[in-house]
Image (cartoon, rainbow, N blue to C red):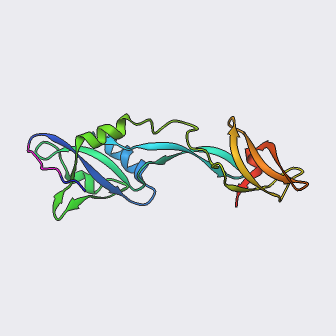
Amino acid sequence: MVVETIETGTAHWYVIQCKGSESFRAAEHLVNQGYEVFHPVLDVKRKRQGKLATVTEPLFPYYLFIRLDQVVSNWRPIRSTRGVLRLLTFGNTPIAVPDALVETLRAQPHRQEGSHSYFTAGEKVTITDGPFKDLEAIFTRSKGEERAIVLLNVLQRPQHVELSVESLEKR
């Protein structure tokens, strides 16, 4: 871990640890209080109630970045903000994160939809619907948002079959 020396009178990025599953709430409340907050997120595909849905999740669960000045910023309200657990410290000194690290994270396209497929090539899946129900297959690739190509053993021969992504389940 890199600990940056802190200059008085200049703002630095610090890390806030959030309560479980409350990083979005903490970020919202901190922004409402006038703080500059960076909460990197990504859109991932998850199966919810049998359907594939895109869900926004934090890149770093339980953590977000806040820009503060040791002299000018009021640090007291941070501790009592909903969703905030604590400011990360080394002893009693808050840990400054290098600006270059945060700028690099900001430059990354974390919110690219569809960039994180629910299934990965070579993964074993079970077919949950249709004529091949309860058969095992191997996921080979996605075909658009809602279709998938799987390798299925039919009559002792591997066959590529196109199915709905909703009819597949991870093993």
Residue situated furthest bottom in the rendering: 91
Residue drawn where x is 41% and y is 49% of the image: 25
Tell me if residue 6 is in the magenta stretch: yes
Name the image quarter holding residue 134. bottom right
Numbered-mark total: 0
In screen coordinates, is 99 left or right of 167?
A: left
Magenta stretch: includes residue 156: no
Residue 108 visible in the snapshot: yes
Tell me which residue sits at (45%, 39%) in the image: 110
Q: Residue at x 25, y 40 (%)?
A: 100
| Viewer-side residue, 137 vs 57 | 137
Residue 135 place in picture, x, y as percent: 83, 58
Of all residues, the one furthest to the left in this rendering is 8
Tell me where residue 128 appears, x and y as whole percent.
80, 55
Residue 83's x, y, as percent?
38, 55
Query: In this view of the protein, can residue 35 be seen by the observer?
Result: no
- Residue 113 % position (x, y): 55, 36
Q: Main secondary structure of the magenta part?
A: loop
Q: Give the side of residue 143 with respect to residue 158, left or right.
A: left
Please identify the quadrant where the N terminus is shown: bottom left
| Image height of 144 relative to 17, above or below | above
Indicate left or right for 51 with 87 as reference.
right
Q: Which residues are magenta?
A: 4-8
In the displayed structure, does residue 135 sit left or right of residue 30?
Answer: right
Quarter of the image with the C terminus in it: bottom right
Residue 132 vertical placement versus 105 (above, below): below
Q: Quadrant of residue 73?
A: top left
